[in-house]
Amino acid sequence: MGLAHKVARTIVHVRALRSAVLDSGRISFQRVGHAGLAEVGAFRIRHYRDSASAYLLDQLDANGLDDLDASSFVYVARSGGQIVATLRAVPAPFELDHYVPRERLQAAVGGDLDRYVEVSRMLADPRLAKRGIGSATVGFGGIDLLMNTKYRGYFAYVRLVGDRPETRFPGASTVLKFQIPARGSHEYAVMAGTIGIDALWRGIGRIRTISGRRTLAPQEHS
């Protein structure tokens, strides 16, 4: 299949998927604006408080937000109208700037950082986490960024457990490691990848699975 044909069919499936997901009454995905940040902050406070990431509350204000939220792309998944997962994609300046010099990150990524976003604040309701709601939200965010913005690369920093990243991103690779002394002696890994056509296909697959819409599976044709 030629690239142009694949792109065209992908766009058709994404449009159909967007309609199906929003109308399904099960799980819906959206990018929220400034007015929706208060709900996102309340979700963070509620779920960080009872998780291993409770220490992150120290980086948030009383409303569960920080100074990067207003300039970020913030995504949520909803079930029954309530947020069940969220994440954000941050254009420069990045949260990682506090821990790694920009020049080091630039050298490690090897691309134009003005075309990259930093994925952070990934959080899912524990009742749905094992069903892939987090991955589906990442997929939806990738689709939105690819179709509606200039950003074509992403990175995220995650804690290392042994010699492996705590969280893996499909298609991403570890590009550098560093420490945050205030959080302990363990290391963090920066994982970077490209937002491309493959991200659209993976996003469709994850969203289709979590929303129960099997009929939207892309069909390959010779």
Image (tube, rainbow, N blue to C red):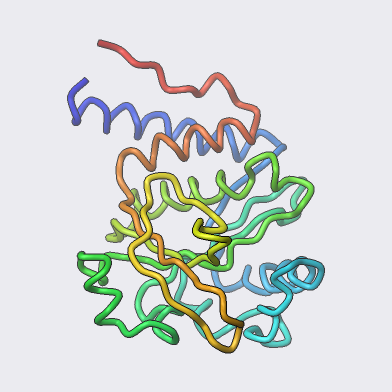
In the image, residue 139 above or below residue 92: above
Q: In which quarter of the image is the C terminus?
A: top left
In the image, residue 220 above or below residue 102: above
Residue pushed farthest top?
222
The residue depicted at 42 percent of the width and 29 percent of the height is 13
Residue pushed farthest front?
162
Q: Where is residue 25 in the image (x, y as percent from the top left)?
A: 71, 37
The residue depicted at 57 percent of the width and 58 percent of the height is 166
Left or right side of 148 for 103: left
Q: Where is residue 175 in the image (x, y as percent from the top left)?
A: 33, 63
4 or 20: nearer the eye?
4
Left or right side of 1 for 158: right
In the image, residue 7 above or below residue 108: above
Left or right side of 173 for 65: right
The residue depicted at 58 percent of the width and 61 percent of the height is 161
Q: Position of residue 181 (x, y in %)?
A: 54, 87
157 or 179: nearer the eye?
179
The residue depicted at 65 percent of the width and 83 percent of the height is 60
142 or 95: nearer the eye?
95
Total labels drawn: 0
Q: Quadrant of the N terminus?
A: top left
Q: Where is residue 139 in the image (x, y as percent from the top left)?
A: 48, 46
117 or 179: nearer the eye?
179
